[in-house]
Image: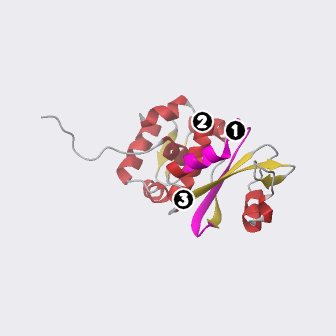
Amino acid sequence: MSWKRGAYPEFTVEDVVAVLFLLRNPIGRKTISELLDLGEGSVRTLLRKLSGMGVIESSQRGHVLSERGRKLLGGISKEFSEVRRVGEVEGFPAYALIVRNPPEFKSIELRDEAIRFLARGAMILVVKNGEVVFPEDGRPLRETMPELAEKLSVLGPDDGDMVVVTWAENPADAMKSAYHVAVFLKDVPEEIKSLVR
């Protein structure tokens, strides 16, 4: 009879991307676990794998990106930004990120992709003439949600950028569903994908 003890660590590419952004500053395993709603065993395994790749360094203050890790994150950051909390939508915590130079897309497909990945809802927006608008009709977000539009402008999107806003039952699901849309649109390095196989 063949069996293994304990549960298998479970984390996704989106968790890996989130951890890389978090590790720009020293942070502990417990904090990562709480922020991403991941079990400590999964976080421990993920950090061990990142350390084995030479992507992170550990100290008394926590874990932080190594030089190699900063280069890896720099490449990702050229494709999309870190998620930021932008308040609430429909009473749920909402997060947003910017996708730079997005490929052609259908908003409804990307929204559905976010919802499949635990979001309660999502908005896919674009920036035209310095304003965040709905891509289908060019209607400015500020006309229907001025407070959210103001918070998104602080992210500093440029013309042509896509802005992904997701909301979910909890902050971790909202954050990771936004990252999911970005990862769905943009290729992440193979070494990141290999961590979850």
Asked if disc 3 and disc 2 are in contact, CB closer than 8 Å, the reply is no
**93 inside magenta stretch:** yes
Asked if disc 3 and disc 1 are in contact, CB closer than 8 Å, the reply is no
Residue drawn at x 38%, y 54% as measured from the top left: 39
**35 inside magenta stretch:** no
Question: Percent from the top left, x then y, of residue 104?
Answer: 71, 36
Q: Please identify, in this view, whether the residue under mark 3 or under mark 1 is nearer the observer.
A: 3
Q: Earlier in the sequence, mark 3 or mark 2?
A: 2
Residue labelled with disc 2: 72
Residue 78: give its label. Answer: 1
Q: Is residue 45 above or below residue 33?
A: above
**Nearest the eye: 138 or 86:** 138
Res 146 seen here: yes
Q: Quadrant of the C terminus?
A: top left
Q: Element at badge 2?
A: helix
Q: Earlier in the sequence, mark 3 or mark 1?
A: 1
Q: Which residues are magenta?
A: 89-114
**Nearest the eye: 16 or 185:** 185
**Coloration mode:** secondary structure
Question: Percent from the top left, x then y, of residue 77?
Answer: 66, 41
Residue drawn at x 51%, y 35% as measured from the top left: 192
Quadrant of residue 4 in the image? top left
Question: Percent from the top left, x then y, of residue 133?
Answer: 78, 53
User: Dot 2, how many residues are within 10 Å of its Cα: few (below 14), some (14-19), or many (20+)?
Assistant: some
Question: Percent from the top left, x then y, of residue 150?
Answer: 77, 63
Residue drawn at x 43%, y 45% as measured from the top left: 11
